[in-house]
Amino acid sequence: MHSHRIFDPDKNVRLIADKLYESIRELPLICPHGHVDPQLFARNIPFENPTDLLIRPDHYILRLLYSRGIRLAELGIASKDAAADVDPARVWQIFADNYFLFHGTPTGVWLSYVFSEIFNIPEPLNQHNAMVFYDHLNAELRKPEFLPRALYNRFNIEVLTTTDAATDSLSAHTAIRSSKWNGKVIPCFRPDQIIKTYTPGWGNAVQRLGEMVGWKINSYQSYIKAIEERRKYFKRMGAVSTDHDVMIPYTARLQESVAEKIFQRALHSKANENDTAAFEAHMLMEMARMSVDDGLVMQIHPGIYRNHNNMLYKEFGPDMGGDIPVQVEFTRNLHNLLNAYGNDQSFQLVVFTLDESTYTRELAPMAGHYPALKLGPAWWFNDSIEGMTRYRKMVTESSSIYNTAGFNDDTRALLSIPARHDLCRRIDCNWLAQQVARHIIDMDAAQHMAYELTNGLVKKTYNL
Amino acid sequence: MHSHRIFDPDKNVRLIADKLYESIRELPLICPHGHVDPQLFARNIPFENPTDLLIRPDHYILRLLYSRGIRLAELGIASKDAAADVDPARVWQIFADNYFLFHGTPTGVWLSYVFSEIFNIPEPLNQHNAMVFYDHLNAELRKPEFLPRALYNRFNIEVLTTTDAATDSLSAHTAIRSSKWNGKVIPCFRPDQIIKTYTPGWGNAVQRLGEMVGWKINSYQSYIKAIEERRKYFKRMGAVSTDHDVMIPYTARLQESVAEKIFQRALHSKANENDTAAFEAHMLMEMARMSVDDGLVMQIHPGIYRNHNNMLYKEFGPDMGGDIPVQVEFTRNLHNLLNAYGNDQSFQLVVFTLDESTYTRELAPMAGHYPALKLGPAWWFNDSIEGMTRYRKMVTESSSIYNTAGFNDDTRALLSIPARHDLCRRIDCNWLAQQVARHIIDMDAAQHMAYELTNGLVKKTYNL
Amino acid sequence: MHSHRIFDPDKNVRLIADKLYESIRELPLICPHGHVDPQLFARNIPFENPTDLLIRPDHYILRLLYSRGIRLAELGIASKDAAADVDPARVWQIFADNYFLFHGTPTGVWLSYVFSEIFNIPEPLNQHNAMVFYDHLNAELRKPEFLPRALYNRFNIEVLTTTDAATDSLSAHTAIRSSKWNGKVIPCFRPDQIIKTYTPGWGNAVQRLGEMVGWKINSYQSYIKAIEERRKYFKRMGAVSTDHDVMIPYTARLQESVAEKIFQRALHSKANENDTAAFEAHMLMEMARMSVDDGLVMQIHPGIYRNHNNMLYKEFGPDMGGDIPVQVEFTRNLHNLLNAYGNDQSFQLVVFTLDESTYTRELAPMAGHYPALKLGPAWWFNDSIEGMTRYRKMVTESSSIYNTAGFNDDTRALLSIPARHDLCRRIDCNWLAQQVARHIIDMDAAQHMAYELTNGLVKKTYNL
């Protein structure tokens, strides 16, 4: 791969970008938000094969293959009713046949990095060399340097946060901590299941939560106390943050008596839509209050219509590439939460968006004012060359880089982690270089900002 | 005109762009969506004069002239009450006096191409040389090489789709087919009039449809059967697609008995607003179902507030430059349609938008997942240098170019067709060149993508 | 400061941009919209100190300092309950300690200009040289060339519009006019207080208005007559424009009898939310009607949620950096107003937006059609390098530059005026140069457009 890749074609910009990049290239990867399975590090056994490592768990890849008419069953994805029995090598060939789909997409850039920089393959993948790739990767995966812990170390990861349901036992995390390995893998408290009273599994999740904290949850008060208790456990296990998925980030506190009534109705499956929406808005307020109390950084990821493709969801379950964003409103929706807690400097609220029209209009103006609010990096579909570039250009002038949360890779694909960080570092350095070349900032400022964007801001935001 | 026009100033990008452009420059023009009058080719008689050819039918030109205080009557546009009696040379002079308005607009770029490349005039139009231009153009239009069929051949058009009401007799198309000319001009089935029960002409249009298929339409069933029958006729006449204009692209199937009741109320002018909206949403589902059955590609162009300027509309009718876009929502509105038919690979749904905030947020994620969904090119106000550039940068990373429908010129101005294709080809090659120069894709991939963007995708999408 | 600052790194673009810039650099500053206190010029006394001049009145600076946890009291901002008693030099040091916050923001660019070009300080501000800066600035402010009128002349301002409540006595303007100074400082009629029946001060403001025109306002008719009378006074005092702040730019005329009833309910504090919203929508229609009659240019600035941070507002009042934009809709909301008055060429309506998604979707298409409508420049959070660049790229192709209102600085910070105009001129010339370098327009057109963007359009829009 070209050492000046991603940088502007202009020689002036390119040289400055490269200088900035060289100054931060060796910095450790700090990963405060992601979805890598902690069992990988607990077990530390070899990956099965290239297909199970790189294709089947990657919803970015699945969605584009699916869009071209390739059925998930052909890729060996097990449906709810039928086990998948497809030769992983055959799946790899299908993937290679369609590799051209990823040209000009971030997945294409990440995969190039993985093949070239991690597996040292000098040529691009195509339909003809598919099996050569497959065999080479398969052989490499057998080597001890491709065990998960070895990769963690090789990638120079300083800390890796996973995402864990509130009712997760954190047994994998316990196993990692009790092993002699010195990697830092920490959980993140994700209470969606126990908060979303409108989902089918809510009642069971609340019951499980009660079992975990040791008391029966039969009232709003015992429920709140259980959540507080569970957050303490996550904190003891290293957690520094919580994470919240909501369709609409509406926030509004209920009177406790009202919350109790809705909670009871929910327990008896009698809550209506207004109830569950009001309860969710209330619980976001409660999550913020608890964060003020216990110091866990609160993250909100709103605006995704989950499982938009009903048929696919019924057959294969979630995370198959069928989640679609919707428009989001922040100024009015976050008004209550920011007025209650946004002036509190001990509170950190990180907000993400997939609705780029909110960057200049809502989020950057709010982050450039409320002490508690930080903007998360360009997320998901926008964690891309153009997406990250737009983010910097639309956010910085109103919020300054200092009210952003730094980069996170937000991935479940372990091998893509260095690829994603590298891409972000190149984009950031290139963006700074453009400003230096245009005499908007000087080289000293750019150098300082490059460090902040790479390590400083993320450490500060997440208290790492 | 400079051979490197439109390309980036950077020499590196420019040379790559030029190389890519040269590789696709001679490819035929494929025009799967537009509004050229088929009578032009049926009659094949000389154009009246430069004003009637270039100014009066072009709403892009009319709107900007109107915005500067020039009345449509001054331009010789006939109102509903009064014939226009303005010397076309006088109108041409007004146009030339105000030609500066078009600097930096796509119309300016297209007109430059027309004057320079089609009429071989070496200088730009201005108020002083207006009559020289006029006389030269007038003389040229008398020559046989400026007859519509000759221009079609000279422009290297491979296929040209017109837009035709469901109740159009297609007599012009019949005339073209029965002539000895080998140009391929095909209709597109546009049933807006017979679907929009809320418009004044609906009842008459439905009656006319009945006459055409040969039975009286007095029930929902006979209405649906008539539409199916009419689509068959369009297909026999070469049609490969349908086209649908809706303000809000809401889709939802009604029970047949409910559809029947609304249809009856509409026939007796008793349908209310809820009825007509529900019926339109239902008919979009029906149009998709029929497309699955007969293979016609379905196109939706939503989000235009037609005839926003009431006064102008009352006096001069539609298409005078007074249509204004509104915000559009796709994720929820298309949910029913995509769930019913979006997983079907035999179905092609092409969606257009004027609301660029939906590119990264809704359309690219959906097109990058549903096999049936393709994104139409940057449309109308965004069919421009900056608009097409934003489109590529906002759409590609989530949908890949392979879920886009390729270019179409969407024009009623025959002479602008090569200008529009040339502009798009330059923009696309320049965008690819930027990625090659930044080492994001290699030259092989870029070359392949340049072909796909120019011819491959559009042929595949429209089964041409 | 580098003479080619802000221009593209590309040498070709840069040389063209510089040539264009040199051709308009010396043109006078025309300031048709801003918030400088006219008392500055009436009194013409030295500025107190650097902190009171540059920091405390600048909500751009306050908001970013506040976002980093610095309390307004620390900056010596007086709250409603307590006077501030903080050494301005101490505040300056805090500002300098946090100056890095402004890197990459427009405030940073403006401040660099102020320090370098106005105060001739050759180095950038930082925590170490804070007191050197402070002392130097303090000394300079004592000199006669730093008196407000001297600065006005030195900045080459041709006309400066202030913003004045409808009930303002305009005594400062009277004083300026009766002095011998030849600077042209004119008022702008801002009737928000007397129109927003839902605000606490409305009743008093209306009473004050009555006192000023000399009759008791006890009916809708006497109220309308008073506003017309007051506009006449503003016009006699030099005003050429009005300005309107609304959350939602909905416009709709009420029957006079309905307007009267709502007015009476409002007078007796019995108006409900529907009343006040309908009255505001009606009064926008009335303001347009009056503008048609008296020729004052009408400006609308919609879409700001004022005083979003309740706590800060209660303690410190408005304009402390706590205003946050919301989404705005124009196509439907302005429909009534544009249909009633938008075809009238004697009427000028200038619309601003903070919602950039409306640029290509709504505002540019409407401005490119309705003779009365002009787009105001990139506003507030978007009055920045990237914001202005996006504005040109998103607006021009549909509206042409000739339906935009030219630049205005919209500032209350006198010293930032030349900095803001200089930045805009550089951005505009650079944008034109990109088009010349890409052969989209020729140098003659660019030169003409540079003049129009700098002086021509603003003079024409505001009849100056």
Image: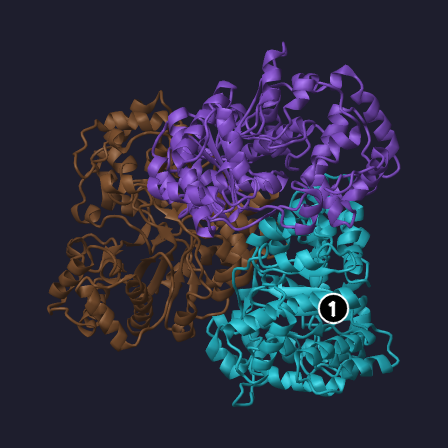
Chain colours: A brown, B purple, C cyan
> Going 55% across and 74% down the picture, which residue do you hit?
C276
Q: Is residue B152 above or below residue A19?
A: above
Q: Quadrant of the N terminus of chain A?
A: top left
Q: Tell me where residue B18 sits by quadrant.
A: top right
Q: Tell me where residue B156 sits by quadrant.
A: top right
Which residue carries the number 1 mark?
C290
Left/right placement of residue C408 relative to residue C390 reads right
* Disc 1 chain ID: C
Measured as percent of width and height from the top left, residue B105 is found at 69, 41
Measured as percent of width and height from the top left, residue C436 is found at 73, 40
Q: Is residue C390 above or below residue B292?
A: below
Q: Quadrant of the C terminus of chain A?
A: bottom left
> Going 43% across and 63% down the picture, which residue do you hit?
A374
Residue A21 visible in the displayed image? no
Task: Check disc 1: other Cα within 10 Å, few if <14, some if 14-19, many if 20+.
Answer: some
Q: Mark 1 falls on what kind of element?
A: helix
For the residue pair B131 and B333, the one nearer the viewer reads as B333
For the residue pair A412 and C49, the one nearer the viewer reads as A412
Measured as percent of width and height from the top left, residue C84 is found at 56, 87
> Going 37% across and 44% down the picture, which residue do you hit?
B335
Left/right placement of residue B186 relative to residue B445 reads right
